[in-house]
């Protein structure tokens, strides 16, 4: 009976005029900052296991990399073929693992749902049929109009996944263009600010008013069902495309303002989702008229400048149409794709890219995203597409895990890259923290040093600091930073980018030597909540921590042992007090991260053999 009454209430609401738009209200985003992730596709892997290695498992056996939001697709063609509940268990798992505010990519009709219009001569539209049919009709037992295939698809999808999705991203990169006009500003002929976009130029093969119509349908359906959710434009790459959305209505012929179609597209979305890859968008180079050539600054800090420039361009478009928090509500903003490659394959940049640049960029962009007011940041992508020796494209090596797409690699065998470790460190030390301008000002930053201040959920303060990288390809500048007395007299320890792996901190001193790799200053209580810490020796061939260990034990090797790993000549075992030996899987030895969760509590000898070298360490399993 209760379900029947609830359904009736939905129908009654659906049949009323839905007057509210994003010109009236945008819900506040009060959740933790989203450290997101684009999974990618790996044919041997189920989405549930990708979720586990992203977020970590509840029992701690898989630590994950600190993700608390993911961005999968809920494509119409897929749901139509396999059933709208086909991903229920996966999305419920994400929520249980700590990711309740996910982004879902929406769109991509099945052939039966796809429209027959040919807005681009000789090319069928990629959008849905019946989009200008009424959204609601209360026929055939449903509130939505089944002839409007997009409204029907959105309604069924939100009904199924509404409790696990917060952002509904309408298409992925609808502004992918084939004529090269998207990047042009108003000084170039053919730019999208001053000209209608030719449907043949863009991925959706439809005019801009058709995309605005998708936004309007999405807004009406989603807001009736989940009023606190966000309708997001789909991962835009060009501010000029956003300008076209803002100045165009969903009037079917030309996008003009009429009584039936009164508002531009800005009224029908409340979240800006954008994509930015600084190395592809000119952030690393500036033209030198004197030399007649480019000057390059390929560093993590220069990448930040490129991201901020693009964000400000998008914000300027929104402000031009009144969405500035004064005339109309300000939009929520998320970045749903970004990264730098660990390796370039062109001669000019090949020697300048590095794991350090990628790792440092990811840490810095997380902090800057919070400072700039972004609600979520989703890097591309979870794991490398190829092994390093087989990679031939820079997007192959953007993973937070090394290559996993092999039938012999299981969930216990995955190896995090340095970027993956750094991502987890940020989550461990700053999850739930908010950017604080007053805390940032306490840093009193000198020239050559940058940083960000935060306020933790418990009220304590935290800081991230680094030396600015301003020389081409150099992630190792050196700056001495005199710690202000207000911070020095506080209660802080210093953690490095790899804290999540080392669990090592050091005492805060009056002078800090900074490099391009960020360090964290946090209250010791934050560190103690992650797990035990240790001071790591630096003069031993093999270092082991934490010791005692509960679930995982980290092993660091000197150069001789590293060579043995590369030659697959390293073996290891635990020997208990009765002399019984338990071999350690080679993949775990190679990764330097050994699972001891199933090892009985007690004292063991850890025996490592590499060619003619043996090392024995006494370790304790708690």
Image (cartoon, helix red, strand yellow):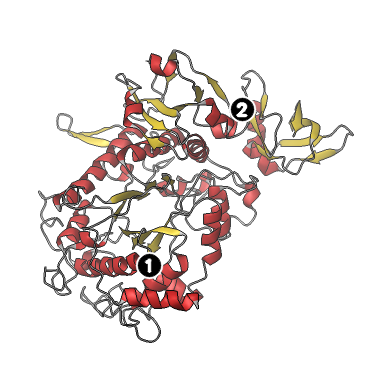
Kindly tell me whether residue 314 is visible in this rendering.
Answer: yes
Distance of label 2 from label 1 (alpha carbons): 47 Å
477 vs 279: above or below: above
- Residue 599, percent from left and from top: 77, 41
Q: Residue at horizontal 38%, vertical 22%? A: 477
- Residue 69, percent from left and from top: 46, 51
Kindly tell me whether residue 608 is visible in this rendering.
Answer: no
- Residue 127, percent from left and from top: 30, 72
Question: Which badge, 2 or 1, is on the more N-terminal residue?
Answer: 1
Going by the image, does 111 lie left or right of 424?
left
In the picture as drawn, the residue positioned furthest to the bottom comes out as: 140
485 vs 572: above or below: above
Going by the image, does 613 lie left or right of 34?
right
- Residue 337, percent from left and from top: 37, 50
Q: Residues within 10 Å of mark 1 (few under 14, many from 20)?
A: some
The residue pinned by badge 2 equals 533
Pick the front one: 525 or 567 = 525
Residue 586 quadrant: top right
287 vs 189: above or below: above
Pick the front one: 25 or 394 = 25
Q: Circle 2 — which element?
A: loop
Q: Nearer the viewer, mark 2 or mark 1?
A: 1
Q: Residue at horizontal 25%, vertical 60%? A: 177
Q: Residues within 10 Å of mark 2 (few under 14, many from 20)?
A: some
Q: How many numbered dots are placed on residues in this image?
A: 2
Q: Circle 1 — which element?
A: helix
The residue pinned by badge 1 equals 225
Pick the front one: 338 or 565 = 338
Tell whether label 1 touches label 2 (CB within 8 Å): no
Q: Residue 70: give its label.
A: none
Quadrant of the drawing holding the C terminus = top right
């Amino acid at each position: 009976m209760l379900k029947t009454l609830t359904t009736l209430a939905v129908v009654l609401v659906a049949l009323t005029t839905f007057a509210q738009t994003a010109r009236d209200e945008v819900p506040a985003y009060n959740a933790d900052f989203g450290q997101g992730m684009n999974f990618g596709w790996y044919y041997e892997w189920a989405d549930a296991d990708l979720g586990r290695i992203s977020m970590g498992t509840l029992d701690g056996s898989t630590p994950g990399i600190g993700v608390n939001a993911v961005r999968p697709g809920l494509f119409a063609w897929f749901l139509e073929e396999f059933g709208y509940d086909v991903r229920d268990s996966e999305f419920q798992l994400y929520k249980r693992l700590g990711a309740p505010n996910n982004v879902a990519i929406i769109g991509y009709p099945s052939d039966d749902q796809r429209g027959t219009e040919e807005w681009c001569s000789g090319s069928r539209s990629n959008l849905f049929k019946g989009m200008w049919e009424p959204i609601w009709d209360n026929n055939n037992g449903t509130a939505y109009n089944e002839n409007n295939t997009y409204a029907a698809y959105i309604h069924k999808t939100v009904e199924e996944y509404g409790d696990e999705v917060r952002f509904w991203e309408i298409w992925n990169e609808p502004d992918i263009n084939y004529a090269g006009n998207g990047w042009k500003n108003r000084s170039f002929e053919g730019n999208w600010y001053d000209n209608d976009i030719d449907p043949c130029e863009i991925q959706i093969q439809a005019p801009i008013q058709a995309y605005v119509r998708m936004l309007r349908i999405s807004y009406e359906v989603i807001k009736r069902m989940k009023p606190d959710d966000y309708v997001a434009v789909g991962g835009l790459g060009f501010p000029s495309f956003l300008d076209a959305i803002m100045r165009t209505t969903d009037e079917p012929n030309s996008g003009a303002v009429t009584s039936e179609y009164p508002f531009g597209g800005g009224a029908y979305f409340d979240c800006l989702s954008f994509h930015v890859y600084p190395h592809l968008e000119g952030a690393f180079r500036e033209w030198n008229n004197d030399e007649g050539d480019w000057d390059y600054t390929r560093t993590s800090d220069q990448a930040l400048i490129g991201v901020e420039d693009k964000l400000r361009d998008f914000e300027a478009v929104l402000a031009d149409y009144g969405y500035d928090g004064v005339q109309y509500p300000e939009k929520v903003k998320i970045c749903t794709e970004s990264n730098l490659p660990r390796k370039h394959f062109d001669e000019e940049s090949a020697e300048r890219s590095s794991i350090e640049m990628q790792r440092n960029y990811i840490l810095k962009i997380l902090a800057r995203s919070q400072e700039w007011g972004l609600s979520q940041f989703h890097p591309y992508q979870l794991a490398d597409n190829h092994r390093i020796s087989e990679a031939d494209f820079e997007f192959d090596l953007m993973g937070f895990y090394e290559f996993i797409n092999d039938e012999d690699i299981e969930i216990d065998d995955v190896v995090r890259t340095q970027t993956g470790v750094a991502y987890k460190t940020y989550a461990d030390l700053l999850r739930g923290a908010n950017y604080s301008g007053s805390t940032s000002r306490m840093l009193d930053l000198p020239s050559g040093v940058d940083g960000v201040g935060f306020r933790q959920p418990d009220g304590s303060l935290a800081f991230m600091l680094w030396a600015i990288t301003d020389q081409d390809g150099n992630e190792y500048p050196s700056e001495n930073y005199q710690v202000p007395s207000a911070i020095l007299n506080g209660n802080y320890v210093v953690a490095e980018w790899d804290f999540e792996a080392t669990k090592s901190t050091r005492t805060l001193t009056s002078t800090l030597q900074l490099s391009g790799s960020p360090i964290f200053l946090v209250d010791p209580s934050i560190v103690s909540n992650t797990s035990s810490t240790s001071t790591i020796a630096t003069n031993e061939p093999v270092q082991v921590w934490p010791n005692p260990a509960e679930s995982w034990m980290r092993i660091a090797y000197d150069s001789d042992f590293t060579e043995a790993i590369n030659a697959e000549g390293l073996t290891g075992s635990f020997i208990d007090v009765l002399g019984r030996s338990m071999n350690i899987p080679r993949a775990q030895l190679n990764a330097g991260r050994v699972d001891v969760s199933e090892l009985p509590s007690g004292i063991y000898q850890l025996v490592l053999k590499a060619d003619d070298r043996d090392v024995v360490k006494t370790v304790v399993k708690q």
